[in-house]
């Protein structure tokens, strides 16, 4: 979120033209959501000791943290030897704090080499990001089959209710996709697939209709229909032989020359675009409503950021958008300020309030490949990369039209924008020069050098 947030602020500073596509982390053989670490693993950033840190080491891992989801929170929706589909639970069911984004769902797909996904449609608008591999997607729009090649880093959108299927035509690598769905169902936050092809596993939508209706609809004897609609038993994702794959690749056009670009947009690749922001500490690229018609229809911005080892995003917040972020690769941690969590949630330890009415709780969590975290609008956050490697983050900003990213630290922090007299009065520091010295000390912005001091509870080198 922080990353997502910082993205938005800098967008106010620089504009970029983007289309519908997104970047991917180098996830060769790991998968987007690898297995969790063992119980004894305490992460790269164990809990600090000292004032305000009397909670247990694994406190940030507790279920009561409503903003962070590790890969074991994903539920399998479809699985076969050829691949699987997984999704996070309905955000609104996890916590009342997330009810505002209950119509959005995060899913991931993995298809092994030379596989096909059954044609179906879902009652949700679907934004996909290819995190690894290559293949193609085909969907029906205005009685026309639209086929689009997909590769790592692509972002693409499929409207709700449109029949589509995916093909992994690679002989060696799995096709991996991370995606955000905005549900259209009357059941808030729920979505379902409707299979128009299949058989016994899974059933098709035709199974709900009576024999006489099907006979009339297809003008075919029911025995023949039962034979056709009852043969498939291989699951949602299944293998195809190389000859079948080659034939599918030969048939049909992948170009959009005969179609209106606005009617049938192409994928947009975030990885191939010039970064919206870049310095020695990292970079990020994004695509939003102004860059792509489909993103405009769902009011979502998609971004991809890379933090170099030992760096951090400057604490910042979104003015309007809520961010849902997925760690594509690497390890690190987040810290976020939240005014809603307190003793009543049984998660954050209480601090003395004194005479203040507001208590900002510190939300802390370790990040690793596959972790998903939510950053509500207005919540300041920072992401910190481990010193052992890069941290790559994909994010979706919801309600992003008109959103800005405002930074609370760094060369472009909001305090620098305020009138000097207001700064001095607000901090009640007799010597105003002290405030100005502090605000001018950081020469970088957006992505900064991270905490360099070694934690007291982190093992020290014996050398």
Image (cartoon, rainbow, N blue to C red):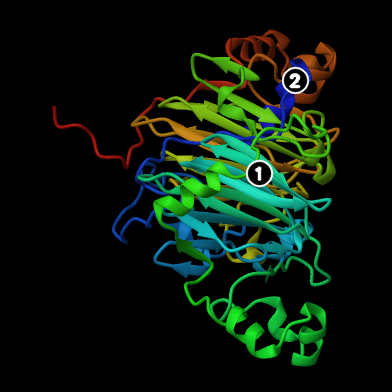
Comparing 14 with 59, the one in front is: 14
Comparing 289 with 247, the one in front is: 247
Q: Residue furthest left?
A: 463
Taking the image as shown, residue 265 lies to the left or right of residue 65, namely right
State the residue at coordinates (74%, 61%): 102
Mark 2 or 1, closer to the camera = 1
The x and y percentages for residue 430 are 73, 15
The x and y percentages for residue 265 are 75, 36
> Which dot marks residue 147?
1
The answer to whether residue 253 of the structure is visible from this angle is yes
> Which dot marks residue 108?
none
State the residue at coordinates (86%, 32%): 402
Q: Quadrant of residue 405?
A: top right
Q: Tell me the distance, in whole angstroms, between the alpha carbons under discs 2 and 1.
A: 50 Å
Rendered position, 173 above or below 59:
above
The x and y percentages for residue 159 are 77, 51
Q: Which residue is mark 2?
A: 415
Rendered position, 380 above or below 421:
below
């Amino acid at each position: 979120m922080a990353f997502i947030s910082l993205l938005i602020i800098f967008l106010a500073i620089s504009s970029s033209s983007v289309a519908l596509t997104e970047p991917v982390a180098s996830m060769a053989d790991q998968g987007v959501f690898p297995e969790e670490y063992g119980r004894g693993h305490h992460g790269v950033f164990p809990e600090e000791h000292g004032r305000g840190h009397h909670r247990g080491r694994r406190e940030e891992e507790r279920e009561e943290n409503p903003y962070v989801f590790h890969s074991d929170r994903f539920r399998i929706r479809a699985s076969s030897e050829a691949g699987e589909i997984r999704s996070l639970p309905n955000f609104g069911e996890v916590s009342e704090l997330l009810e505002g984004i209950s119509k959005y769902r995060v899913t991931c797909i993995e298809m092994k080499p030379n596989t096909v996904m059954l044609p179906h449609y879902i009652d949700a608008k679907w934004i996909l990001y290819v995190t690894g591999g290559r293949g193609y997607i085909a969907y029906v729009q205005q009685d026309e089959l639209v086929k689009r090649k997909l590769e790592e880093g692509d972002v693409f959108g499929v409207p709700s209710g449109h029949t589509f299927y995916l093909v992994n035509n690679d002989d060696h690598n799995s096709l991996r996709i991370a995606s955000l769905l905005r549900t259209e169902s009357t059941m808030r936050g729920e979505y379902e697939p409707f299979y128009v092809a299949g058989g016994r596993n899974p059933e098709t939508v035709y199974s709900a209709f009576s024999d006489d209706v099907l006979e009339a609809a297809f003008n075919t004897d029911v025995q023949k229909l039962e034979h056709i609609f009852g043969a498939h038993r291989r699951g949602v994702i299944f293998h195809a032989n190389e000859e079948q794959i080659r034939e599918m690749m030969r048939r049909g056009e992948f170009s959009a020359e005969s179609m209106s670009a606005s009617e049938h947009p192409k994928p947009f690749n975030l990885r191939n675009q010039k970064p919206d922001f870049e310095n020695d500490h990292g970079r990020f690229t994004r695509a939003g409503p102004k860059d792509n018609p489909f993103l405009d229809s769902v009011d979502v911005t998609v971004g991809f950021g890379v933090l170099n080892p030992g760096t951090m995003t400057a604490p910042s917040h979104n003015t309007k958008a809520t961010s849902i972020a997925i760690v594509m690769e690497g390890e690190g941690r987040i810290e976020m300020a939240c005014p809603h969590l307190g003793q009543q949630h049984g998660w954050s330890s209480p601090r003395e309030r004194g005479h203040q009415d507001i208590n900002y709780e510190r939300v802390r969590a370790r990040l690793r490949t596959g972790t998903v975290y939510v950053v509500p609008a207005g919540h300041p956050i920072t992401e910190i990369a481990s010193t052992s490697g890069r941290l790559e983050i994909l994010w979706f900003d919801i309600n992003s039209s008109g959103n800005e990213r405002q930074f609370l630290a760094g060369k472009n922090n909001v305090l620098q924008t305020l009138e000097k007299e207001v700064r001095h009065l607000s901090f009640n520091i007799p010597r105003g020069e002290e405030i100005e010295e502090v605000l001018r000390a950081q020469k970088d912005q957006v992505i900064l050098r991270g905490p360099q001091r070694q934690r007291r509870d982190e093992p020290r080198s014996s050398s």
